[in-house]
Image (spheres, grey):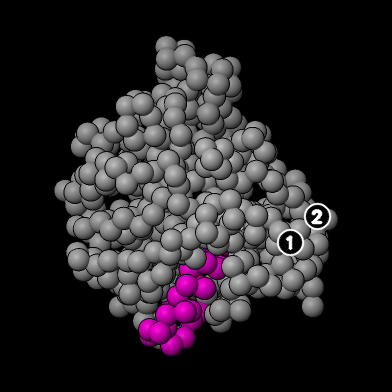
Amino acid sequence: MRVLVIGSGGREHALAWAIAASPLCDALYCAPGNPGIAEEAVCVPVPASDLDGILALARRERIDFAVVGPEAPLVAGLVDRLEAAGIAAFGPNAAAAALEGSKGFMKDLCAKYAIPTAAYGRFRDAEAARDFVRRRGAPIVVKADGLAAGKGVTVAMTMEDALAAIDEAMIARRFGAAGAELVVEEFLAGEEASFFALVDGSHALALAAAQDHKRVGEGDTGPNTGGMGAYSPAPCVSPAIEREVMARIIEPTVRAMAAEGRAYKGVLYAGLMLTDDGPKLIEYNVRFGDPECQVLLPRLMSDLLPALIATRDGVLDGFDLRWHDEAALCVVLAAKGYPGDPLIGTEIEGLAEAASDPAVKIFHAGTRREGGRLLADGGRVLDVVALGRDLAAARDKAYAAIDRIRWPGGFWRRDIGWRALGRR
């Protein structure tokens, strides 16, 4: 089977690494890929945003199965384009991808089908949004309706911060068209977790839970980022909570999307808040998380590719996956200046030495090669992942590997895993 992975980040490197190990995969391509992915696949410099280019590449290389990594091409309808051309593709079509493409759509779906989530309002007028905030008070959450590269959410602890977030999105237009409409919702107290399931249109297969670290600074301080690290399993998601999430959130969503004529196929990523009243849905993503994907796939004992194919083909019912008992922990290495203006072009050395432990895998997220040198080429640059008998062992291996990397232009948090390990 000839497989194409679309995307260029750490998530896509993890997907390519897992798919390359499948006996079903005869040839693997990635568009556009990165230097790490190039060790697993033939990288072709076609941006994930170039839908025409991706379609032409898939036709030219006689691709049998495409796996779309990022959310933007999914929302833009890349799966629709590939399937119309007779190329099987993993991921939701544009109608189903609205679960992430429009936070307002997702909230309205939850309200209509009684899926537990925060109380909210939708606004296209800044003054109406301000009035809502004044009536509700703080803390409160302000979200751009559309895709904003993970930066469109403000958890406002004061009314002033909430009003400023509204003005930033709707008046200053920081997020462009994505912020033309806002969702303003109640602040949920509890512990956050990420939960993943494969969905084939009518059936859902639970994968595993993880916990991400969104804030840039240690102790969860500073601005939100795309994610500074993750670990799996998440001790806060017990088997009982997993069953509740499937029964009250995931499965009702699958039925709701089918009833709305938007049957969902792909991976469904539920961002959860574990409240005193039970798990509540914060948001849906329509792709594997990043960096959560980087801790899920190393724990997966089963072949990933047949599971992705079964998802697309609508035959997940009765499908099963096996998982390693080991824990996985990922630390994201970011370029100085991130999440603002990252320092681009600094040299990174020592990766071979860092990955000498077979329990350690380094996924590239934002790198490029220039001659024989590896350079930073993004905000989040490398994902150092380690497996261990438990989270503490995985953490120790990950940081031991990082200590071998020579990169003065980078930084990383030293406390990834603190929530889970604090319980010990």
Residue extending furthest toward the top: 135
Please tell me whether residue 253 is drawn above or below residue 184 in the rendered image: below
Q: In which quarter of the image is residue 371?
A: bottom right
Visible residue check, residue 330: no
The residue at 55%/62% (across/down) is 387
- Quadrant of the image containing the C terminus: top right
* Residue 158 forms part of the magenta stretch: no
Q: Position of residue 20 (x, y in %)?
A: 48, 79
Q: What element carries label 2?
A: loop
Please tell me whether residue 116 is drawn above or below residue 347 in the rendered image: above
Q: Which mark is residue 376?
A: 1
Q: Residue 319 carries which label?
A: none
Q: Quadrant of residue 310?
A: bottom left
Q: Where is residue 160 in the image (x, y as percent from the top left)?
A: 58, 17
Give the spatial CA distance, label 1 vs label 2. 8 Å
The residue at 25%/32% (across/down) is 111
Q: Earlier in the sequence, mark 1 or mark 2?
A: 1
In this orientation, which residue lies closer to the viewer: 336 or 360? 360
* Residue 9 forms part of the magenta stretch: yes
Contact between marks 1 and 2 (CB within 8 A): the answer is: yes
Q: Tag 2: residue type?
A: Gly
Q: What stretch is highlighted in magenta?
A: 1-29
Please tell me whether residue 202 is drawn above or below residue 120 in the rendered image: below
What number of labels is visible?
2
Q: Residue 409 carries which label?
A: 2
Q: Is mark 1 on a helix, strand or loop?
A: strand
Q: Where is residue 356 in the image (x, y as percent from the top left)?
A: 69, 72
Q: Tag 1: residue type?
A: Ala
Query: In the displayed structure, does residue 369 sit left or right of residue 260?
Result: right
Q: Where is residue 88 in the image (x, y as percent from the top left)?
A: 32, 74
Visible residue check, residue 217: yes
